[in-house]
Amino acid sequence: MTPITEVEGRRLALSNLEKVLYPATGFTKGEVLHYYATTAQVLLPHLRDRPLSFLRYPDGPDGQVFFAKNVPPGTPDWVTTAEVPRSEGPARMVLVQDLASLIWAANLVTEFHTPQWVIGAPGLADRLVFDLDPGAPATVVECCEVAVWLRERLAADGISAYVKTSGAKGLHLLAGVEPVPSERAVEYAKSLAVEAERVMPGLVVHRMTRSLRVGKVFVDWSQNAARKTTATPYTLRARREPGVSAPVTWAEVEGCGAVAQLTFLAADLEGRVREYGDLLGPLLDGGRAGVVP
């Protein structure tokens, strides 16, 4: 029998709680739901008002993994949805605005991915993102060197950058900006990626071509496009272990000498949030937003 749980007055049917989703550690679906319930206070502000793309893995990372953007069948009528413009025509997508909606979505077993704009201003970016992806044998250690350079370069333009692990191999650099057309955000981010490659040609590449990325860090600027999304802060990832896209301090980035130093699993986050709060909190403060030149 599927257990029924009440969350903020909403009744939720939570299924298969004993199912192992992360085979390397035995982490179960019930533990996934517990993780999201205990990190909701820092996760929800980063989801709020941003149309959600689901990267679902209902049978774990070794099963079928697939993106879903439209409102899933069976979505409760109390879950907020909104019409989102797309090149192929408008679509209706989910907005996770509260704890009940978060737990409902987590019960689908999904990564959370969101765009760099909010539903009230589609196509106007209020965040910049740089996805730093290492090509073997490069690792997150090399990503850290690139991240520090980008932080300083952004600061020169009056933009403050914050950083999180991708939850996979690399890092995500994020910055809050005054709303700007996504096309301009893409142009600016690409210009910095090109500049980084020029300054550090042995370490950085700004093009996606796989053959160019061996031993280098790909600075992916394209996720600033209005149609694209990035893993939301604090989301679990569909990996062998329950890795988290975890905010980190710049001191941790500057001091990183091994992959393990910037690898965080679900069990690590409660203590980190207790110690640091939301390290990406400044992104939510419009008064701190920079201006894209």
Image (cartoon, grey):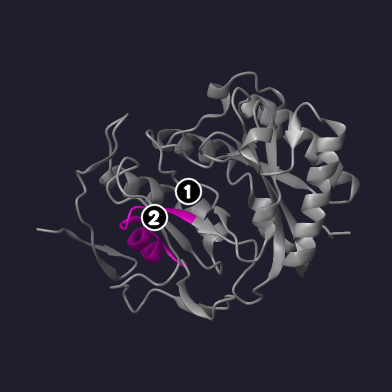
Viewer-proximal residue, 31 or 204? 204
Across and down, in percent, residue 84 comes to: 55, 77
Q: Is 178 within the magenta?
A: no
Q: Which residue is mark 2?
A: 66
Q: Residue at x 82, y 44 (%)?
A: 194
Q: Quadrant of the N terminus?
A: bottom left
Q: Please name which of the two marks, 1 or 2, marks the residue nearer to the observer.
A: 2
Question: Neighbour class for label 1 at 10 Å: few (<14), some, many (≥20)?
Answer: many
Viewer-proximal residue, 156 or 138? 138
Q: Give the secondary structure at mark 2.
A: strand
Q: Give the secondary structure at mark 1.
A: loop
- Label 2 is placed on what type of residue? Phe
- Label 1 is placed on what type of residue? Thr
Residue 65 relative to residue 85: left or right: left
**In this view of the protein, can residue 103 be seen by the observer?**
yes
Question: Mark 2 and mark 1 in contact (Cβ < 8 Å)?
Answer: no
| Residue 203 versus residue 222 in the image, above or below | above
Residue 51's label in the rendered image is: none
Across and down, in percent, residue 52 comes to: 49, 64
Q: Quadrant of the C terminus?
A: bottom right
Q: Residue at x 31, y 43 (%)?
A: 60
Instruction: List the single residue furthest toward the top.
Output: 257
Which span of residues is magenta-colored?
A: 97-112
| Picture quadrant where residue 19 is located | top left
Marks 1/2: CA–CA distance? 16 Å
Across and down, in percent, residue 3 comes to: 16, 58
Q: Which residue is mark 1?
A: 235
Query: Which one is earlier in the sequence, the residue at label 1 or at label 2?
Result: 2
Instruction: List the single residue furthest toward the left.
Output: 1
Across and down, in percent, residue 127 comes to: 70, 58
